[in-house]
């Protein structure tokens, strides 16, 4: 069943002669439980597309259905609720709060959710354990390596038990070893938990960890194919 359905999606910034068209009629579906990489060079439109898929921006025209309902039919409060409960976000820059522990960073999405407070502690600890950071729970971001910061960001994305995780260049600021750990965690979340993963990357070797790759160029889909020889990012991170 398609969790995400995009048809003839277009995005244009500003008007008139100075208008910039970021997306030119993009069409594709993503089934629940798929791991899809959207890749392309800088300026290809992949981050613009992710922002629309994650309810962080609106398309200029075309249709976008999430979980069977068109985005324009959602009330504003419902959009915020879905983004908090059904979507998790992981960014290249980590976006962790400084001078705040891993535990407190992971807790934050729950504060804005409708999840009962008596469930918060168990959820936070489970999410942190899932990314192998149990021993770092009381550490602040300044005390973590880049890879550990990204693992904390993934735990924060997981804590509300979302249907889909959007990962925007999650290995971009990491060395190859730390990046491999991040990709293994994402693969585990997809294979073990059946979580839908949408990965944005410009790196072929990172995209090949996914089941399917959508190649973008100049705001259009250049190619959409299944990964025949999918990489397995097996490492020895502590689960």
Image (cartoon, rainbow, N blue to C red):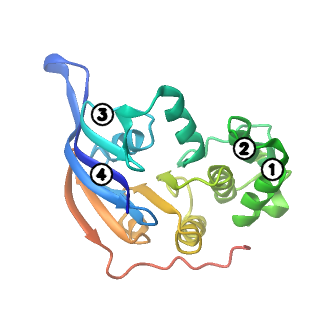
From the top left corner, tell me how far across and down residue 95 is, in percent.
Answer: 62, 41
Task: Give the SS element for disc 1.
Answer: helix
From the top left corner, tell me how far across and down residue 71 is, in percent.
Answer: 38, 37
Task: Give the SS element for disc 4.
Answer: loop
Do the residues bearing badges 3 and 2 touch, measured as CB atoms within 8 Å? no
Picture layout, residue 143 above or below residue 131: above
Which label's residue is closer to the chain start, 1 or 4?
Answer: 4
Q: Residue furthest bottom?
A: 229
Q: Residue at x 44, y 37 (%)?
A: 55
Q: Residues within 10 Å of mark 4 (few under 14, many from 20)?
A: some
Do the residues bearing badges 3 and 4 touch, measured as CB atoms within 8 Å? no
Give the Cα distance between marks 3 and 4.
21 Å
From the top left corner, tell me how far across and down residue 130 is, in percent.
Answer: 71, 65
Q: Residue at x 68, y 34 (%)?
A: 112
Give the Cα distance between marks 1 and 3.
36 Å
Q: Comparing marks 1 and 4, which lies closer to the viewer?
A: 1
Give the Cα distance between marks 1 and 4.
42 Å
From the top left corner, tell me how far across and down residue 132 is, in percent.
Answer: 73, 66
**Quarter the N terminus occupies:** bottom left
Task: Give the SS element for disc 3.
Answer: loop
Q: Comparing marks 1 and 3, which lies closer to the viewer?
A: 1
Which label's residue is closer to the chain start, 3 or 2?
Answer: 3
Which label's residue is closer to the chain start, 1 or 3?
Answer: 3
Q: Residue at x 43, y 57 (%)?
A: 198
Picture layout, residue 137 above or below residue 105: below
Q: Which residue is mark 1?
A: 119
Q: Which residue is mark 4?
A: 41
- Residue 110 is left or right of residue 80, and the answer is right
Give the Cα distance between marks 3 and 2.
30 Å
| Disc assigned to residue 115 | 2
């Amino acid at each position: 069943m398609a969790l995400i359905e995009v048809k003839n999606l277009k995005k244009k910034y500003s008007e008139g002669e100075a208008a910039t068209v970021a997306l030119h009629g993009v069409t594709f579906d993503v089934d629940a439980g798929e791991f899809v990489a959207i890749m392309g060079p800088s300026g290809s439109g992949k981050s613009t597309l992710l922002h629309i898929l994650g309810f962080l921006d609106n398309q200029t025209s075309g249709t976008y259905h999430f979980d069977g309902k068109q985005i324009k039919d959602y009330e504003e409060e419902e959009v915020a609720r879905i983004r908090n409960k059904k979507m998790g976000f992981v960014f290249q820059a980590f976006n962790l709060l400084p001078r705040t522990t891993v535990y407190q960073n992971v807790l934050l999405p729950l504060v804005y959710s409708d999840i009962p407070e008596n469930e918060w502690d168990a959820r936070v600890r489970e999410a942190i354990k899932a990314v192998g950071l149990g021993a770092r729970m009381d550490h602040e971001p300044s005390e973590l390596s880049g890879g550990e910061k990204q693992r904390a960001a993934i735990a924060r994305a997981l804590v509300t038990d979302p249907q889909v995780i959007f990962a925007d260049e999650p290995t971009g600021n990491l060395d190859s070893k730390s990046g491999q750990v991040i990709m293994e965690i994402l693969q585990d979340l997809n294979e073990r938990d059946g979580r839908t993963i949408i990965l944005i990357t410009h790196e072929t070797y990172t995209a090949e960890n996914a089941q399917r790759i959508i190649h973008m160029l100049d705001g259009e889909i250049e190619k959409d194919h299944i990964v025949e020889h999918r990489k397995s990012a097996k490492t020895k991170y502590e689960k």
